[in-house]
Image (cartoon, grey):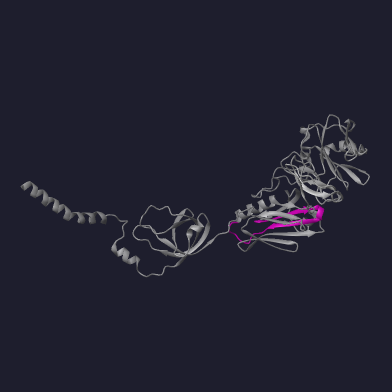
Amino acid sequence: MIMKSVNKKGLLIAIILLPSLMLVACGKDESRPTLDERMEATQDEKPATILFEGEVQPLETTDIYQKGTHQLLVDEEIIFLQSRTIDLSDYLGDQVRVEGEMQKGIGSTKSVLSVIQIERLAQADDLGDESYQNESFGLGFKYPSAWQLNEGGEVIGLQFEQNDLVKITGFTGQGDLDEVASTREIDTPVEVTVGDQRALRYIQGSNITVYVPNPPKDSVYQITFAPTLGEHLEENQERFYDLLKSVELYYMTPLEGKACGGEPPIACDEGYVCQLGDGSEFAEGVCVSVDEQLTGNSCPIVSKPDCEEYRIADYTTRGCPSRYECVTDGEGLDPNGSDDTGSESDDASTSENSMDADYKIPSASQVTQEYINKKQGFKVLLPKEWYYASFGPIDGSVWTVGFLDEELEAVDKALVTLTIQDTAGGQASRKVGNLYYVFEGPEDLTPVMEAMANSVGEVDIEEE
């Protein structure tokens, strides 16, 4: 009985002391706010408004006493956010500028920014979200959605955060690239390739000016990068070079009509022909009348050289590219401003024969094999042991035939092309009746193409 009584008394003492022991233990946890700290935090103080820029992220703290619903990553530092009026979840992953009042943290918890205003920041690297196309101006390109585009007359302006960035001016009736550039610049230019054209680039400090010709329209475009805002300079400069790489020149107005070609093939009505976009097997196009195709607005397919970088070397009288030449890879379009791309014009001309190793150059005396097309009523000689393929009307031509020293399935694989059109052009052509038989291909095959052109003759058309 005595032992039981002692145990009860000990148990009673333990129960009485337990709350005191817990208080002592909890008092050692410095992260738990004291009463004085709680009272201090509830005092009515008006914090100053603070601005931060960074990326909104989900809250990742494990501190149960930490206030805030989201966090802002600012130069690898974390700012805790909260707001009673704004749903910060709508801005997750966005670069933003936030304005708010910093609320002092309690105990070891960090302070939290109470957001009263938030806005997304424009991103300079959103390239490709917007496209500009102006066929009458003769120019098209892609630009970041963060840039604002304005146009008026012969001038196009691009701004970033309301600051001038890029200006494009068109000089019509002034098709001489070198003359237009030399009258406006005093430095020595670097040759570059923009829009498949030989262009000229000038660099002065952070300013970049590029002159791009559009020979069929007898125009030259002055494209200038002259930032008035120092922030995001490198990003915007890289985007400017991307814009240059996306430049597309418009020579003629695309035709409109019923769709044709494709897979399965769609045929045109009687009196119309399918003007294809290219010479591939399942190419698509539009149906144009027989009369319209003779004065078609699109350019015929021209074989391009077997090199990664090339540009237009000659044009037909219709303003269409008739010959391409190889240029140095990535010539001149270097965001770092490197000029070691070979500014001598001879570099391009010596590289245009880079296909020499890919084919044998026959002599004009070997142009002995006969090709006959009774549907269009013509015949032509081609080099012995060469192959040919007939592709029909393509891009404004009445008919297109491709020639190669091996079998070919698409016109863009041809070494030499013959297009029947209403104007002369190419390396060689011959007029038969009201039409021109135009031959186009590498420069070193000009004697062969001249022999082919001289061999063109008429045959009776075979009725279907």
Query: Is 450 within the magenta?
Result: no
Residue that appears at 94% across and 45% down: 433
Q: Residue furthest top?
A: 385
Q: Is residue 313 visible?
A: no
Say which quarter of the image contains residue 144. Answer: bottom right
How far from the left and from the top, in percent, is residue 42?
34, 67
Q: Toward the viewer: 44 or 163?
A: 44
Seen in the picture, residue 408 relative to 434 is either above or below; the reply is above
Name the side, left or right, on which 125 lies relative to 414. left
Query: Is 224 within the magenta?
Result: yes
Name the side, left or right, on which 359 lies relative to 98. right
Residue that appears at 40% across and 53% down: 61
Segment colored magenta: 205-232
Name the side, left or right, on which 355 lies relative to 3. right
Q: Is residue 408 visible?
A: yes
Seen in the picture, residue 115 relative to 464 is either above or below; the reply is below
Residue that appears at 52% across and 59% down: 96
Say which quarter of the image contains residue 227. Answer: bottom right
- The quarter in which the C terminus is drawn is top right
Seen in the picture, residue 360 relative to 148 is either above or below; the reply is above
